[in-house]
Amino acid sequence: MSERTTAFFDIDGTLGWTDPVARELMSDAERKLSPVPSPVVADAIRRFAAAGNRAFICSGRSPLDIHPKMAALPFSGMACLAGAYVKVGDVVLRDVALPPEVLACVDEVLAETGMGALLESARGSVDVRGGTAGTHWPSPASVAEALERIPGGRAHKVVLPTPAAKLVVSRLAGAVGLSIMELELGNSEVGLVENSKSGAVKAILDYLGDAGTTYGFGDSENDLSLFEQVDVPIAMGNASVEVKAAASMVTDTVGNDGVATALAKLGLI
């Protein structure tokens, strides 16, 4: 009998991608959802799990922003919100939200700069002051109002224009351990240092006990911490230079079904 293995998959740029032209034709609700995996990649995940292996989503996204077609695949659990929310089956291993002082600072910075933000939580995401692009009106004019729209009134991380994100981190330096990760379109993600893909994967592996050989698939900077916890880090063909340098294997691009190609090459499907 072959060894049971465990694999962790980033979503955007790894399991799937959205064509920019097609994205412009989507509704705001559709744009918030993750990309849909291609039929080839979806079939590869099903075959991987059917062989007795465990597959986990490992993403910065909120669980509620994962496309239903992605969530319907046979994943054993998820590490979402950049490690702030971790679940195996029905068991929640981590649920670490931003403390009130961070949210208060975000509110102050947004009011001073006139910029907007996106609050992300395990129970949904809400724009503040028009969102990072300032175009999603009507939306709450304050963080407090935005939290009222999230069940439980908690946020696990926040996305802001990079200048605002840097201002929040600098103001709270020495008081709260925050991390900042630059994203696309001039935005950055701010969260607690303790929340990372590395910590999330470690929590899952500790919970599983015997995970067999572990694999991690990613394409961007925040996947480097995922790579730290797995036996075989695999970079997508569209990954950054740094991610490729940290990987044991570089597969094809997301547009060419790189996840399926790697699983087949490794003899896992």
Image: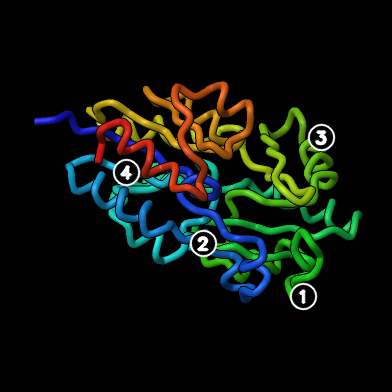
Note whether residue 95 is visible.
no
Q: In the rendered view, does 108 fall on the left or right side of 215?
A: right
Q: Secondary structure at mark 2?
A: helix
Q: Nearer the viewer, residue 74 or 134?
A: 74
Give the alpha-carbon distance from disc 3 to disc 2, as whole Å: 29 Å
Q: Nearer the viewer, mark 3 or mark 1?
A: 1
Q: Earlier in the sequence, mark 2 or mark 1?
A: 2
In the rendered image, which quarter is residue 21 located in? bottom right
Q: Characterize the local packing of mark 1: few (<14), some (14-19) or many (20 or more) Cα atoms within 10 angstroms.
A: few
Query: Which amino acid does the dot numbered 1 rest on?
Result: Trp
Task: Find residue 55 and name its label.
Answer: 4
Q: Which residue is mark 2?
A: 65
Residue hosting label 3: 170
Which residue is found at the position 83% from the left and 56% from the top? 110
Q: Reading the chain from its start, which is encountered first: label 4 or label 3?
A: 4
Q: Position of residue 212 (x, y in %)?
A: 24, 27
Q: What's the amino acid at mark 3?
A: Ser
Mark 3 or mark 1: whose residue is earlier in sequence: 1
- How far from the left and from the top, in percent, is residue 18? 57, 59
Q: Going 54% across and 52% down the picture, which residue do you hit?
A: 61
- Spatial CA distance of label 2 from label 4 is 19 Å
Q: Is residue 163 left or right of residue 39?
A: right
Q: Position of residue 247 (x, y in %)?
A: 49, 24
Name the residue beneath numbered marker 1. Answer: 137
Disc 3/disc 1 C-alpha distance (Å): 29 Å
- In the visual, does 249 lie left or right of 189? left
For the residues labelled 2 and 1, the Cα–Cα distance comes to: 20 Å
